[in-house]
Amino acid sequence: MKRTGLILSIVFVLIAASAKAQDYKMGLGIRLSSNPAIVNNSISFKYFFTDKTAAEALFSLEKPFALGLLVEQHQPFMGNGFKYFYGGGAYAAFSGEKTVGLQGVLGLDYKLPSIPFNLSVDWKPELTLANQVSFEPAALGLSARFTFK
């Protein structure tokens, strides 16, 4: 009985230690945006292809309905759980006049060590190229995602 408890304790410690050391593979949640960017308040899905390279899909359900895709590079920052990221991509809006454009991103990502949850804050400027050329430089966002291995 004591041996079983000892073995279970060791297994638990090893799992907990490995969970802290690993990051996440996928995240699904929401992104709230501060300014009237085309891809504003949205559903966020992030998927890591490698330890450092991720793709993030944004589905904005407000008007205009828009889809955005970003390719991001993540680098360690200030220790355990923190990463900064940067990248770029494109978007398309489908409500009313159809719009397409380019977007960049620069942000900070934090994976909570003991629960499957991640927070990030970012700056995502957008350059609209179709219909009317415009630039939205001040789009700040906060994302909260459930994470999966």
Image: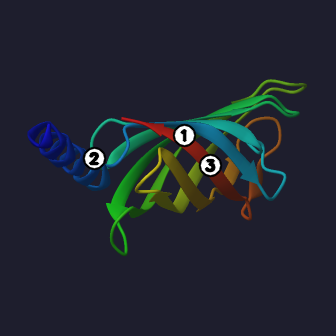
Separation of disc 2 and disc 3 at Cα? 20 Å
Q: Is residue 122 left or right of residue 108?
A: right
| Residue 8 showing in the rendered view | yes
Q: Which residue is mark 1?
A: 146
The nearer-to-camera label among 2 and 3 is: 3
Marks counted in the figure total 3
Q: Quadrant of the C terminus?
A: top left
Separation of disc 1 and disc 2 at Cα? 18 Å
Q: As displayed, is residue 14 above or below residue 68?
A: below
Residue toward you, 92 or 78: 78
**Residue 91 location in percent, x, y?**
64, 35
Disc 2 secondary structure class: loop
Examine the image and state in which quarter residue 40 appears.
top right
Residue at 28%, 50% in the rendered image: 16
- Residue type indicated by callout 1: Phe
Q: Is residue 144 left or right of residue 131?
A: left
The nearer-to-camera label among 1 and 2 is: 1
Residue toward you, 133 or 107: 107
Q: Is residue 131 left or right of residue 26?
A: right
Q: As displayed, is residue 35 above or below residue 3?
A: below
* Residues at circles 1 and 2 in contact by the CB criterion of under 8 Å: no
Disc 3 secondary structure class: strand
Residue 51 marker:
2
* Residues at circles 1 and 3 in contact by the CB criterion of under 8 Å: no
Q: As displayed, is residue 93 above or below residue 127?
A: above
Separation of disc 1 and disc 3 at Cα? 7 Å
**Residue 129 location in percent, x, y?**
71, 41
Residue 4 marker:
none
Please, which colouring scheme is shown? rainbow
Residue 144 marker:
3
